[in-house]
Amino acid sequence: MENNYFRIAGYYQKEDFSFIMDCFGKFEKLWQFSVFVRDKGINVLEVSKDGNFLDGNMDRVEYDKENVILRATQKGKPDYVPYEVNGTDYKAVKVDNCIYIPDKEAVM
């Protein structure tokens, strides 16, 4: 069985806020989660599935087939910052105080 843990960083221009959202169980495929967010008028900036991203300073959520979990929000667009893991600097997304690396191949 494929692991369906997904994470999205998005930006809602109409209200000028960004967020990080996790999903573990509600959708079978990454594209389903992405469409769910996009259909609400939100720009999906980063979309990642388990195995392709690094958690940064965020713990994983528990399995929940009914809900998506809003992890962080902030006014304005998310910040892109360097983040070090085991001596390697990665391009990370930062929303409020939550940081994750959407692409573990994106070394700085």
Image: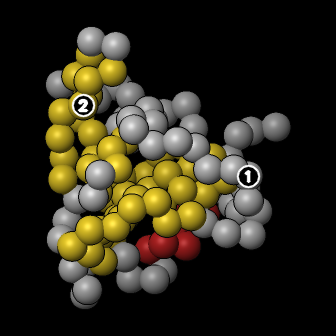
State the mark number for residue 83: 2
In this picture, residue 64 sits left or right of residue 48: right
Q: Identify which residue is drawn at 18% across, 33% down.
A: 82
The answer to whether 79 appears left or right of 39 in the picture is left
Quadrant in which residue 49 is drawn: top right
Residue nearest the observer in this picture, 83 or 39: 83
| 70, above or below 58, in the image | below
The residue sitting at 73% across, 52% down in the picture is 63
Q: Is residue 5 in view?
A: yes
Task: Tell me the tag on residue 32.
Answer: none
Q: Considering the image in quadrants, where does the C terminus appear?
A: top left
- Badge 2 crowding class, 10 Å Cα cut-off, few under 14, some 14 to 19, many 20 or more, is many
Which quadrant, please, contains the N terminus? Answer: top right
Find the residue positioned furthest to the right.
1
Indicate which disc, 2 or 1, sits on the residue closer to the N terminus.
1
Q: Can residue 33 be seen in this view?
A: no
Q: Name the residue under label 1.
A: 63
Report x, y in % for residue 91.
23, 35
For residue 57, which quarter of the picture? top left
Q: Residue at x 60, y 66 (%)?
A: 68
Residue type (three-letter) at the residue carrying disc 2:
Tyr
Q: Residues within 10 Å of mark 1 (few under 14, many from 20)?
A: few
Q: Please give left or right for residue 57 compared with residue 35 in the image.
A: left
Q: Is residue 14 above or below residue 94?
A: below
Expressed as whole percent of the image width and height from the top left, the position of residue 85 reads 33, 21
Q: What residue type is labelled 1?
A: Tyr
Which element is circle 2 on? Answer: strand
